Image (spheres, grey):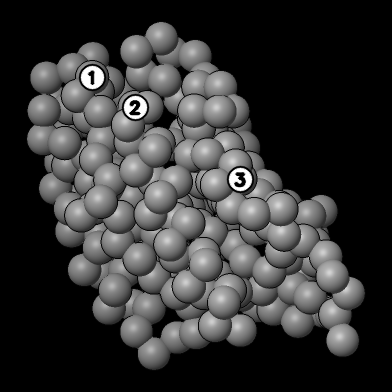
Amino acid sequence: MRPLTKKTIVCFGDSNTWGYNAETDARFDEATRWTGLLAAELDSSYRIIEEGLSGRTSVKEDPLFEGLSGLSYLYPCLMSHSPLDLVVIMLGTNDTKARFHLTSYNIAQGIVRLAKKARATTTGIDGHSPEVLVIAPPPIGEKYVDTSICKSMGTQCSEKSLELVEHLNDLLKGTDIHFADSKAEVVMNEIDYMHLDKDGHRQMAKFVRGQITSILNER
């Protein structure tokens, strides 16, 4: 029988997990970030580990910045925090950047590759696989092209992020990886249209909490 220990959850994502504040270019504090809110709202039997990094992609190395591919970092990350009950992966926003030359389907393929890698590790309880939840982030708003961030992102990012959900859903069918689309319950800000504001973080915390309790209570 497993000892009475906290359920450990790694939240693996980009700037929207790290807590980037588009209004100030700084980081939201722990009490504002969705991971912090999630930890506060769950009971003491859970432990939430933040693994957010601004600019992180699923599998692509960024030619301009070092260390942003999730694929190369995932294994040591999960090993360092093991044993784990659940790995939550929310990526895809940065993968839409024009310099990566990826279609929305390619982006979904990269995220699924990452999720399968997490699921194949022995970082779960007693050397088993952890549960894995892929969350499709809220889509990038069309008006991002009217902001300064478009200079770095390029065009067609909003369209790619909208199409991502369908491809993720199709590619994850028949697997043992959980999938959830946040679009109906969480929205991006109205500053750069691709980051969560304070309300967005509250919405995301509520959304992820429902997913987590459903998955882990089923076991």
First in sequence, mark 3 or 2: give its number.
3
Which residue is drawn at the image coordinates 61% and 45% (left, top)? 39
In the picture, the quarter occupied by the N terminus is: bottom right
- CB atoms at circles 2 and 1 under 8 Å apart? yes
For discs 3 and 2, the disc positioned in front in the rendered view:
3
Per the image, the residue denoted by label 3 is 39
Per the image, the residue denoted by label 1 is 191
Residue 191 percent location from the top left of the image: 23, 19
First in sequence, mark 3 or 1: give its number.
3
In the picture, the quarter occupied by the C terminus is: bottom right
Residue toward you, 108 or 211: 211
The reply to whether residue 36 is in sight is yes
Dot 3, how many residues are within 10 Å of its Cα: few (below 14), some (14-19), or many (20+)?
many
Q: Is residue 95 above or below residue 64?
A: below
Per the image, the residue denoted by label 2 is 197
Residue toward you, 45 or 81: 45
Which residue is drawn at the image coordinates 41% and 9% (left, top)? 24
Dot 2, how many residues are within 10 Å of its Cα: few (below 14), some (14-19), or many (20+)?
many
| Among the 4 quarters of the image, the one containing residue 184 | bottom left
**Residue kind at label 2, given as amino acid type:** Asp
Mark 2 lies on a secondary structure that is loop
| Among the 4 quarters of the image, the one containing residue 105 | bottom left
- CB atoms at circles 3 and 2 under 8 Å apart? no
Q: Is residue 36 above or below residue 39?
A: above
**Residue kind at label 3, given as amino acid type:** Ala
Which residue is drawn at the image coordinates 57% and 77% (left, top)? 217
Residue 152 percent location from the top left of the image: 31, 24
Residue 82 percent location from the top left of the image: 80, 62
The reply to whether residue 195 is in sight is no
Label at residue 108: none
**Residue kind at label 1, given as amino acid type:** Ile
